[in-house]
Every structure is written in structure tokens, then in C-alpha cells.
Image (cartoon, rainbow, N blue to C red):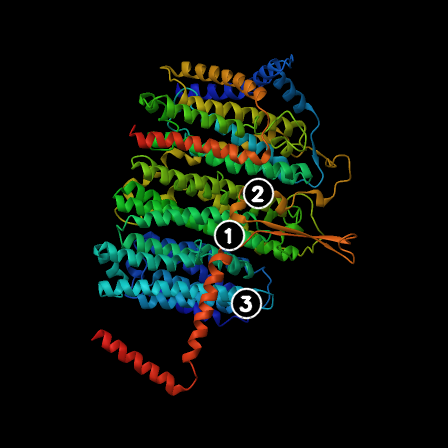
Amino acid sequence: MLIVWVLVSGLIVSGFAFQRTLSTSLTLVLSLAILGIAVLGLWGAWTPALSGPELALTPLRSWFVLVLGVVAAMSSWYRFGYRQHDEAATAFWLPIFLVSMLGVMTAQTVWVFMTAWEVMAITSFFLVVSHHDRPGVIKAGFIYLVMSQLSAMAILSGFLLMAAQLHSMHFTVWAAEAKSLPLGMKSWIFGLLGLGFAIKSGVIPFHVWLPRAHPVAPAPVSSLMSGAMIKLGIFGIVQFLLIDLGTTNMVWPIVLLTAGAVSSLLGVLYALMEHDLKRLLAYHSIENIGIILLGLGVMDLGIDWHRPTLTVIGLVAALFHTLNHAIFKSQLFLAAGAVEQHTGTLDMEHLGGLVRTIPAVAIGFVMGSMAISALPPFNGFISEWLTFRGLLSIVSHSPALWGVFALGVALVLGLTGALAGMCFVKASGVIFLGQPRQQVKQAAVPKSMSWPILGLALASLGLGIFPGPMVRIIAGLEPGLSVHATMVLLPLHVLTLAVVLVAAAAGLALLSRFWEAREVPRWACGREAAPSMQFSSSSFTKAVRTTFAFIYQPHRNLARAGRYPRDFPARLVYRGGTTPTWERYLYRPGYRLAWTLSQYSTRIQAGPVRLYLSYLLVTIGIMLLALH
Amino acid sequence: MLWLVQIIGTVLAVGLAPLFVGVAQTVKARLQGRKGPSVLQGYWVLAKTWHKETTVPQYSSWVFRLAPSISLAALLVIAAMIPWGGTVPQAWPHNLLAVFFLLALERFWLGLAGMDSAGTFGGLGASRVTTLGTGIEPALLASFGILWVLSGHTSIQPIAPELERMTLGVLPWGLAALSYALVVLAEAGRLPVDNLDTHLELTMMHEATILEYNGRFLAESQLGIAIKLTAIIGLGWVWLGPQLGSPWANLGLRLVEVLISSAGLGWVESRFAKLRYFQVPTYLAMAAGIGMLAFYLVVSGGIT
């Protein structure tokens, strides 16, 4: 019942959209209620009181509700200071978006799940197009909507297939009986549902909507979409594909691991080439979804091989990274929103030196950068370490080819981590450090915007130093797996490591008397130093662009402009960039095909209602014949 | 007892690090027909820079002032995690992957410092060092590939005694050692990848990130690079070198091995020319490939 009340109260909160302070406060209260539900669910004793036939909370579902609650609370708090165009529309759709995500996670039947899923897709579409007067926003919104619907169709077909096999639309029945399905049928279900959830999570090659939709949305919405919404795809994969279906064909762990490796590597490679901060962060979401998938692949392998240690490590790595990514990614997106409000732009090439004007946001961003680059003592380090540990556990005690495959995936993960570190040295360095590259406007950033960022940064740090309780909770989510939980983190001694590291750094900093240093002009080979002499975002990544030219297919063009361009060019126009491979070679032909097919369909659509009625009649006749 | 060995080993490794670099420089000088500076030159330079006035470039922030301390702290923790006496105390962190992530931490702050110096050279160094890192990290993982399969976990701790019992033949060990040596040269900023002695803008990588540093910050950075060299060479010998019965003997043997390796480093540095920057990814891919080959020989040969 409690969940129903929260769902209904979400709709009520929407009604106050035109009163800014009241609406923001109520949204915050709603987010805290979601957080409270998650805590009650994880507590365990309250689970029966929360469960009903249509909506129920299991420990696993509570974990994802917790992820949603954390991001929602911080984003709602942030909205007190965040100024945007058309605030009432956002204030109207946001509560519905929040409760629809809660509905997806607590749904117990296909009907409730699909309704909540569609409401989530539609409300998030309206939130994405909040700034609809800016160029390109509507197009991005439509691409997002189309991909959402493809995802929903794939999920619905998978669900109906499963329901037809098990003669039930109820998820509790599935959890009990789906394991006994034949392997061939499991593969079909895995494929369809996996496709749907992969589209929603932005797994490459289904990622095209993500770097378009996230950047154009207002910052709190980007943070919610990246922190919580794409995690619902992960929730679907864990709940329906790994736990419900149980052992599957050995193809599927390979698919998960390959998709994870490809998404993480390509995600970070594309992120490196971005100059727009929010697009950069959006590509990093793809990367982190890839890392989560690697954990899930390890888990699936553990299930198929009946090796509980692998299952636990995979599950813990994936779910812990889900929470960690939600925390540091929403922190980074909120910081990006603060940068945009402060300067009016997100283009890195125009920024620089913001550490002096918005120091709190800069600290939050640098801490978030360290967390997402998996550096100790932050939380990203723990979950990426666990993913490595899972992959390397496959390496030993496995057939030779599996070992080579797993080591290869681990190397890809290592490369991904190093590239992420590089990308965030670039992002932090170009935006916050050095000298401002251009004169930009400097609007104030209120405390209600910087506190949520710093709060999330502290959460990253806290989870990085004390991961033990969280790891125990995750390992206890699925009964029967908890045996090995305490062993998972053992060889790391996180607390000692973090304390020694921080103490050494602090001691050295004091010893070096860092505050005692005279400021002098910087060295520019004896010339006057100018801000344009600093490395820009594109020059920073030049070597990577050259090394991975087979992926980027970079192009550049130097044109002469002016009245006599050949002999006396007034100025030179340089254009450079990389080729959007997936869009050009996969989506454009697909779009053309759909266009052509729809043109054929106009031939049978003349307009009269009687014609359509007869189509209906014929269809029903054919269906009756086929079923007969 | 183990604690005592570990503490003394760490202190010795950190304290002798400038000496090991000095040995490499002297060997290099002699092979080039020069007399070269004293092997203790590193200590004099550290003492001198530490007592000089410290300045920071205009437009830099707290990041620039804290980066040398954080980088050096990461390297000190790495040095403290190497099992100098063969094994480390159980309650002490002893994870190989933690070493990788700490190296990444050091590189991250080096890069930030470069970007914060607000000059051209800092950004250039930050770009080059982090690009180099993208090759080094997978190659380092690959060079340890043989360890993952043999030990089945990521702890440094029991690797050594377990490996003692393995008889794999010379080939996988040799390949793994070669792969690791190639990575060490790149990670420690040595020829043929980087040259710490030059400050020409076309060639410098690590030195470009710390070009604007002087005084106490420069001393920290220079001590850091020496500790890094000592620690990662020591880590290599922990799993490649022979294990003796007593922890003290192990510690002594490790230090002698690092000393010999430093002399060998001097020889390598005077034999090989610097690679072009854009050939370094190929070099590191080769190191990773050799590590994978060693790994494949082990898993396919059924030697486990």
C-alpha cells in the first residue's frame, strides 16, 4: 500500500507545478520518500508490509530504488538554485517521471511494468525537450522517443513470449518457474529482452539516442536519466535474464562480456573527442554501462558454470558499480549544470580557470573525476577493482580459450580505465584549471547547487573508504549467495589503504608548505604568455586520435577564404572532426529502409474509413483461420 | 618480525632510490666515455632544490600546489606494498591491482598539475603522459597475465611461494619478464620511451608536466620518479627472482637485484635511441603481446 501512496502522491505533486518553491520542496519530499522505501526494503523485516499482488519490493528491487532515491533527492535539492527555461513544464513532468521509475522497479505483472515503462519513456521525452526552442532539441527528442519505443516493443515481445510459455503474467510465477524452460526458448527470451534493455541502457550499438538526449535536457534531468533511468535496463537484465532464467546457452555470457567490452572501450574513446561537457559525460555513461555489463557477464558465467564465487563477485561488482556510477555521474552532471549556469556555455574550448570563480563546484568535479577514473580512495576504484577481480577469476581454473578471452576483456577494461583517466584530466584541466581561454559571463552559483555536488562527492569518498557494508548488503540480496560475501573484498584492506594514502598525502603537503610559494609569470620561451598557448581539448587528445584513427576515421579540411582565396587568402578556415561511424553505416541505411517501406505502405492507404474497416475484418479472418 | 622487515624494506627502498638512479646515470656516462657525476648526485640535487625558494606560475591554483604531494604519496604507498621480505603482514594491503590503480592516481595528478601550470609545456606534458598511460596500463596487466592464471587471485602476497613450486620452463618466464621489463622502461620514463635528462620541447614527456615546478615541489617530483623506478623494478624481482628462506635475506637480495637492474638500465639507455612518440603505442602493444603470448603458452600447455 505504501508504494501506491507514493505513486499517487507523485501525481499530486505535479499539480503544484506553477508554484516554484512549493513544487521543488514537494519533489524533494517525494524523492526522500522513495529513498525511505528503499531503506525499508533493504532492511528486510518490512518487505512483507510493502508487498502486494501488483506492486512489491524485493531486496534486489530495493537496491535499484535506492539508486533512484539517492539521485532523485540530490537532483531535487539542486533544483532550488538551478535556473532554466520553462520551469513549470519540468516541475510538472519530473514527479511523474520519478514515480514511473519507482513503478517499473516495483511492478509485479507485465501490465503494470509496461504501463510504468511507457509513462517513464513519455515523461522523459517531455523532460528532454524542455529547451525546445534551441536548435536540434526536438530532433534529439524524437530520436530518443523512437529508440524508446523500439526498446519497449522488444521488451513487450519478450514478456509475451515468456508469459505464453509459463501461462502467467505474474513475475513471481516467472521467478519460480522460468528456470525450467528449455534452453532454446530461454535464448529467444534472452535475446528479445536483452535487446530491449540494452537499448534503454545505451549499450553500443544501440547508444545513438544517449549522447543526443542527455546533453539537451536540463542538468537535474540529465543527472536522473544518466544516474537512474538507464540503470533500469541493468535492473531488467539482472532480474529477468540472470536471476529468473538461470542457466542459459553459453552464448549469452559471451554476448554480455563482448557488449560490455565494446561499450566501455568505444564509449570512452568517443568521450575523449567531445568538446561539449555534457556530451562527454553522456558518452561516459555508455562506458560505465559497459563496465556494469562486464560484471553481469561474469555473474552469468558463474550461474552457467555453477560457480557461486564467480556469481557473487559479478553481482557485487555490477550492482556496486551501478550505485557508484549513479553517485559520481549525477555529481558530474550537476557540476556541468553549474558550469553552464555560471558561464553560459558548455563548450570546453571557451572555458578555463573556473577553479577560482566556482571553487566548490571545481572540488566536486575533480573528486567526481577521480571517482569515475577508478582512482583510490574513491568508490569507482572499488567496483572497478571488483570487476577486474571477477574477470581474472575466470582466467584461472578455466579452459584455455576462456582464459584468453577473459584476459583480453580485462585488458580492454584496463585500457578503458586509462582512457577515462585521460579524459577527465582533460575535462578538469581544460574547464577548471589554468587561465580562462575567453571572457565569459560569470553568474553566481547558489549554495543550493554546490551543496548537492559536494554531498555526492562525500558519498563517493565514503563508499570508497567503507565499502564493506554495501558489499555485504548486495551479496545478501539474493539468498543462497551470501556465503562468500565477506571474502570478496578481503585482500584489498581498503580502509588501511585509504588512511595511509590520505595521511601520506596530507603529511607531504604540510611538509612541502604548499601555501608558501611566490607567484611568478609562467615560461613561454621568453615571450608574453597568452591563454591561447594553453593546450585545448582537441590538442590534448591529438595522439589518441592518431593512434585510434581506424576507429575515429578523422578528417580535416583547411579552406582559404577571402576575395582572392588562391593567392591572397584573407583568412584560413580549419574544420576537423571524426566520422560518426554507427550513424553513417548502421542507422542511416536503417532509416532509409524504413522510409522506403513506409512509402510502399501508402499504396494501401487511400483514406476511406470503409477500406480500413475491411482491412480489420480481413485481418481478424486470417487470425481466426490461423488459430483454428 | 614481518612488520619490521616490511618497514625497514620500505625505508631502505625509498632512501636508496636516488642512489639507484645515480648508478644508472653513472653506468650510462661511463659507457658513453664520460666520467659522469657522482652516484650520490641525486641526494645533493634533492637537498639543493628542497632549500631553494618555491615559486608557482601565475594562474595556477591549489591543484598545482598539492599535486606533487599526492603523486609522491601514491608512490610511497606502492613502495610500502611491495613484499620486500618475500611476504607482507596479513593486515597490510597487498594487492597487485591496487598498485596499478595507484600508478594511475599518480599519473592523473601529474596530468592535472601540467594542465594547471597554464603554460604550453604543462599541457603538452599532461597530454603525452596520459596518452602514454593508456598504453602502459593494459600492457602492465598483460605482463602479469601469467600470474593471474597461476595464482588465481590478485594478491601479491602468496604469489611468491606458490610460484616457487611452478616449473614452467624458461620460455614463458622469459617472455613474461621481457614484457614486464619493456613496461618498466615506459612507466619509469626511461629510454627508449622518454628521456628524463632532456628538456627539449619536442621530446620531453614527464619533464614537461613538472617544468614549472621548482624548490620543494620539484624535489618531491624528483624523489617520486626515483621511488617509482625502484618500486616497480623491485616488484618485478618479487615474482621473477629466487626466494630465500629468511625475510632479511630476501630483503637484501631484492636490493642487490634492484642495484644490478639499475646498472642494466644504464646500459639499455646508452644502447637504444629514443622512439618517435607515435611509435610508442606500437612498442607498448608489443609488450602487451609478449605478455599475452607467455600467458597463452601457460594456459594451452596445461602447465597449471
Q: Say the numbered circle drawn on residue A379.
A: none
| Quadrant, the N terminus of chain B | top left
Circles 2 and 3 on the same chain: yes
Residue at the limit of the structure toward the front, as seen here? A566
Q: Secondary structure at mark 1?
A: helix
Horizontal arrangement in the rendering, residue B87 relative to residue A247 (left or right): right
Q: Nearer the viewer, residue A304 or A59?
A: A304
- Mark 2 and mark 1 in contact? Answer it, CB < 8 Å: no
In the image, residue A448 above or below residue A517: below
- Mark 2 and mark 3 in contact? Answer it, CB < 8 Å: no
Query: The residue under label 3 is which amino acid type?
Result: Ile
Horizontal arrangement in the rendering, residue A80 relative to residue A3 (left or right): right
Q: Which residue is mark 2?
A: A546
Query: The residue under label 1 is which amino acid type?
Result: Tyr
In the image, residue B38 above or below residue B136: above
User: Which chain does tag 2 point to?
Assistant: A
Q: Which residue is mark 3?
A: A138
Q: Quadrant of residue A342?
A: bottom right
- Mark 3 and mark 1 in contact? Answer it, CB < 8 Å: no
Any part of residue B124 in sight: yes
Q: Please tell me which residue is depicted at 37% across the width and 64% down the height of the picture.
A: A103
In the image, residue B57 above or below residue A47: above
Q: Secondary structure at mark 2?
A: helix
Where residue A568 sits: x, y (%)? Answer: 79, 52
Q: Nearer the viewer, residue B173 or B18?
A: B173
Q: Which mark lies nearer to you, 2 or 3?
A: 2
